[in-house]
Image (tube, helix red, strand yellow):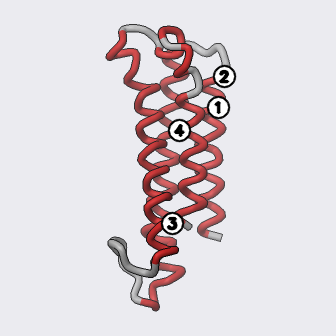
Amino acid sequence: QFLRMNLTLVVIGMILALVAESTDLSYNQQTLLTVMSLVCVIVSVSLSHGVGGLLKHGKNGWRFSQSFQGGAHFVWLQITGWSLFGSAIVCQGLFLFGPFVLGTQMKQAYPGMKYVNLIGGFAGVASQIVIV
C-alpha cells in the first residue's frame, strides 16, 4: 500500500504538470502548479526508494546506496530509473527557470519546448515505476 500511495502521488504530480502545461493560466499559476508537481515527483520517488525499499527488502541486506550491486537486471533498472528521475527534475526545472534565463516564457519563445513540463511529469511517473 505504501508503494501505491507513492505511485498515486507521482501521478498527481504528472496531472499538475499537464494542467500547468496545457491550460491558459497565468505564469504565476503555472509556476505554482509546476513546483507542486516537482515536489510530488521528488517526494514520491525518494520515499519509494528510501522507505519502500527498506520495508520491502530490509531483511535481505538492503541499503540506500547499492552501487552496481544486485545483478545486471537490477543495476540497469536503477540506472534507468534514476536517469528518468533526473530528467524529470531537469525538464520541470527548464519550465520553471527558462523565463528567468530567456526573459520570456519558454513555450512562446521556443515552440519545440512547449511540452517540456509534461515530459518531466511523465518521466517522474516512469521513474517511479522503474525504481519500485
- Numbered label attached to residue 77: 3
Q: Secondary structure at mark 2?
A: helix
* Labels 2, 4: front one: 4
Amino acid type indicated by mark 1: Leu
Image coordinates for residue 64, horizontal then vertical, percent: 36, 72
Q: At 66% across and 70% down in the image, what residue appears?
A: 1
Residue at 42% x, 8% y: name it. Answer: 104
Tag 2: amino acid: Ser
Q: Do residues under tags 2 and 1 come within 8 Å of each other at their CB atoms?
A: yes
Is disc 3 surrounded by few (<14), some (14 to 19) or many (20+) residues within 10 Å? some
Query: Going from the N terminus, do you reach mark 1 or mark 3 first?
Result: 1
Q: Amino acid at mark 3?
A: Leu
CB within 8 Å, label 2 to label 4: no
Q: Is residue 103 above or below residue 80?
A: above
Q: Position of residue 39 (x, y in %)?
A: 47, 44
Q: What is the spatial separation of the Cα atoms under label 2 and label 1, in whole angstroms?
A: 6 Å
